[in-house]
Amino acid sequence: MSPRRLIVLMAVLAIAPASMQARSVCRHFGTHTGWSVHASWATPSDLSADLFVNGHVGNYRYYGLDVHDIYSDYHGLTLSAGTFSAGVSYKFNRWLSLGADLDLGFLWNERFSAVDDSSKGVGTGVSLMLVPKFRVYYVDRPSWRLYGFIGMGVAKYFGYDKLKGADVDPYSGTREFWDYSLRGALQFVPIGVEFGRRIFGFFETGVGNEYTGVRGGIGYRF
Amino acid sequence: MTRKLFVAALTVIMTMTSCVVRDSSGYMRTSRNIANLTGEIVDMSIVSSVEALDRMASGSSDASMETMDITPDGPDAWIVKSVSDRMEFSFRAIRVPDDIDGFSNWTCTGFRCTYRDGEAYKVEIEAEGTISFDWSWEYGVPNSYYRLVQNGAYRSEFMRDGQVLDWCEMVYVDGTVRYRTSQGM
């Protein structure tokens, strides 16, 4: 982005809230500024499921399998309880709020030995995410609102076996450990709806590390 | 009312706890993977060695020959041995001059190879009889080139802690490969 465009964007961001505030005072539209908290449940994240099952995002396979890869454990159906979240946000004006969500996602599957097909028990993966959010309200009415947001944060994956491991260097013979269980997290929600005043419900659809599909929850506005 | 609440709660719980997100199994012990790895080991050992021998016979050499012990064994014949951390192999190679295109053909006997993956896993490969290598013109776009094509058969055994888990029989006919493994075709 050029410096000139950046200055124009900053000017719009600085002026727009005041403009919106003025309109809201005139017409008595929209909700008050201030804090709110919410709790929700969402369908599981496709990205997290990929990381749990494959250790990478997508369905592609690495070529050049070694012998131990061929005899690595396989698994049954991968199930999930979805993503549970709790969050807080602050509404600055009629169109902008900033906040953050703390998310907890659960996945599990039964593992089997490829050598003798015996069960090796259930493997469980837990994802813990902290995702700050930039939320924009498209429509702001006292009893309902339309919004969208982008969230960017961090995720820590516990029990995701394929994100951690060790390799033996073929030249030096030394064992090298690697751990990719701490990663960035992104969430994009193009559309969501809030309904209610002080106590409100919400329903949204989006894609990212927090969830893929839909999320619903309840909240309280202070 | 209580009954409706119970049904609603049960529906929600069942939906949440039975959400299947992946139906793939990640099963890798397939005939294709076993055959692919056998083919890769064949390429890394005997095929690359014959290519190196061919370069040596035509007067050039490269770094790939540093890990090989090449001993002359009569006119146009060599014993090749190679030992590295992961792979050991040996065979006897005979050069057969070709008057038609000027590129030498090769005949290899007694090929045996052991490939190790860590302390537990290894693959043993043995040629069943003679393996012959002929240079063949490969037409392609944008370039056409000569490549070594092989005729012969190999048998590999995949082992863990000395116990054979799988085998693979691989047959090359004019560079085209067919295989059969303990996991199927």
Image: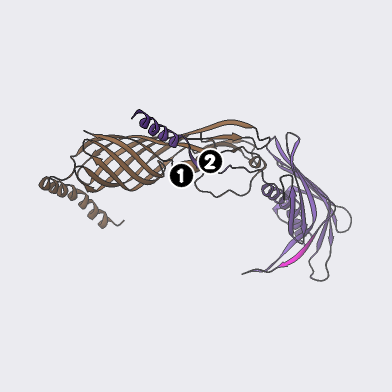
- Is residue B106 something that shows in the picture? yes
Classify 10 Å Cα crowding around label 2: few (below 14), some (14-19), many (20 and above).
many
Sequence-first disc among 2 and 1: 1
Tag 2's secondary structure?
A: helix
Report which residue position mark 1 lands on.
A46
Q: Where residue A58 appears, x then y in whole percent? A: 50, 48
Shown colour of chain A: brown
Figure check: B108 above or below B138: above
Figure check: A4 above or below A154: below
The amino acid marked with disc number 2 is: Val
Figure check: B122 above or below B73: above
> For the point 56% across and 44% down, which residue is it?
B24
- Along the line of sight, the residue nearer the viewer: B44 or B21: B21
Q: Name the main secondary structure of what is drawn in magenta.
A: strand
Residue B136: within the magenta? yes
Task: Please give the letter of the chain rendered in purple.
Answer: B
